[in-house]
Image: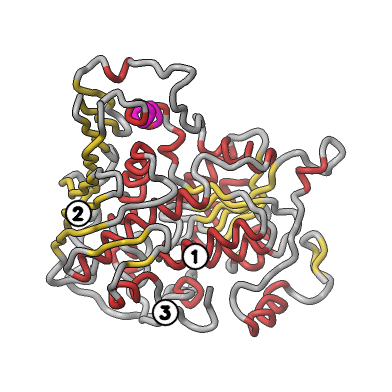
Amino acid sequence: MIMGGMNSGISRRTLLKKGLAGGACVALPVIVPSSVFGQDAPSNKINIGIIGTGSQGILNLRAFMTKSAAKVIAVCDVDLKHREEARKRAGLAQDASYDDFRELLARTDVDAVCVCTPDHWHTLVSIAAAKAGKDLYSEKPLAYSVAEGRALCDTVRRYGRILQTGSHQRSDRDFRHACELVRNGRIGKLHTIKVEIPVNSRPNPLSWKAEMPPVNLDYDLWLGPALSRPYIEQGCHYNWHFIYDFGWGQLTNWGAHVFDIAQWGNGTDLTGPVEVSGRAIFPKEGLFETPLSYDLEYKYANGVRLLCSTTDKPDGSESPVRFEGDKGWIFVSRNKFFSQPDWLIQSKIGPDEVRLYNSIDHHQNFIDCVKSRAKPAADVEIGHRSATVCHLGGIAVRMGRKLRWDPEKERFIDDTEANKMLSRPMRSPWRL
């Protein structure tokens, strides 16, 4: 047996691999966090494991290490170099470092996990964590597909877990205030929302070769549910964003941020658009597959149009959203906030007006909600719906036609071919 992380003779890896005979997402016992037992508990901190320790994983690790009520006690990555960097940053011993996420999830002293894997892994890791009784801080886009997002929502609810989507702009004062002003009619009747996403931030390799994976990388586990393909160095770390087996490019990478704020300001963050159309320019050569640029138009049942275009700024640092109404407009980004008329953004929200979820620190909000069991700022359903807007646009440009969407049933209307793209095949033994 494995008790409290101590091994009595049989390794976790052996037990976990035997457990895979029945499927990837094995239902592990629900673990009650040690932190909920009060002052007499061994620890009053939320013990956190980081799964995926690339650039975003390191950012989240550093953020959680600054929180007095949290403690990073384990790290996991299929790349030994990434894993070792994270382990050393967290000041952990070698036995707190894992190649296989299932080994980390088997630890009974881990209360919550931060999922920072490539997109194609988000859902399966998060579902396994929820079944293991862990609360989750899961990076955006919350899921690789609409079907996976719905499955994750259902699992999180079924197992009573807390999930915070890494859409951290929900915890930014300017983005929240902009959305409150729009929701309270300061720009009159909202009719158009304009957002921008950046161009691909990495050069498209025009030549490449398949080769043996480096010894520090568990490539088979890195692929996981994705279809088998040879290892190509230029298509792995970060560049996976631009290969369809692993991600949907900047549409999900940055679109998840701007669409999230658009949905919030429109009051539709628990539903979605009813129509989508658009066009995209796809690369004609090279390794990358996702579009170079987009022009997308979404329509909502309330008559609002959401327009998405591509900016020539490669880093996406502004993440701009512009709300337009019949009495003015508001522009908000990570470093700019202005309006027309210019006094609009100085307007105060009254006590009887619409007030939106007030969080000023996304990671702290997650920790607080793990303790209180309240919904966090970017709850699982919100994260799923924002990611869905990304997926709808991606499917529309790949289909090359206008699509009608039923946000309640989460199906395209009278379009069997498009509906097939709401899910994806998975490599055995991985499955939802």
Please name the residue shown 25% across and 14% down the image: 343
Q: Is residue 386 above or below residue 11?
A: above
Query: Which quarter of the figure has residue 154?
Result: bottom right
Q: Main secondary structure of the magenta part?
A: helix
Asked if residue 177 lies in the magenta stretch, the reply is yes
Please name the residue shown 16% across and 61% down the image: 280
Seen as rendered, the residue at the extreme right is 40
Gap in angstroms between the C-alphas marked 1 and 2: 36 Å
Q: Is residue 233 left or right of residue 351?
A: left
Amino acid type at image mark 2: Leu
Judging from the image, what secondary structure is the residue with disc 2 in?
strand
* Tag nearer the camera, 2 or 3: 2
* Tag nearer the camera, 3 or 1: 3
Question: Is residue 402 at least partly visible in the picture?
Answer: yes
Q: Position of residue 171 (x, y in %)?
A: 46, 34
Query: Which quarter of the figure has residue 51?
Result: bottom right
Mark drawn on residue 79: 1
Viewer-closest of 95 and 256:
256
Mark drawn on residue 296: 2
* Tag nearer the camera, 1 or 2: 2
Instruction: Count neighbours of disc 2 (C-alpha within 10 A) and say few if under 14, some if 14 to 19, many if 20 or more.
Output: many
Q: Which residues are magenta?
A: 176-180
Q: Is residue 321 above or below residue 161?
A: above
Judging from the image, what secondary structure is the residue with disc 1 in?
loop
Q: Earlier in the sequence, mark 1 or mark 2?
A: 1
The reply to whether callout 3 and callout 1 are in contact (CB within 8 Å) is no
Please name the residue shown 51% across and 74% down the image: 221
The reply to whether callout 1 and callout 2 are in contact (CB within 8 Å) is no
Instruction: Count neighbours of disc 3 (C-alpha within 10 A) and say few if under 14, some if 14 to 19, many if 20 or more.
Output: few
Q: Mark 3 — residue?
A: 425
Asked if residue 350 lies in the magenta stretch, the reply is no
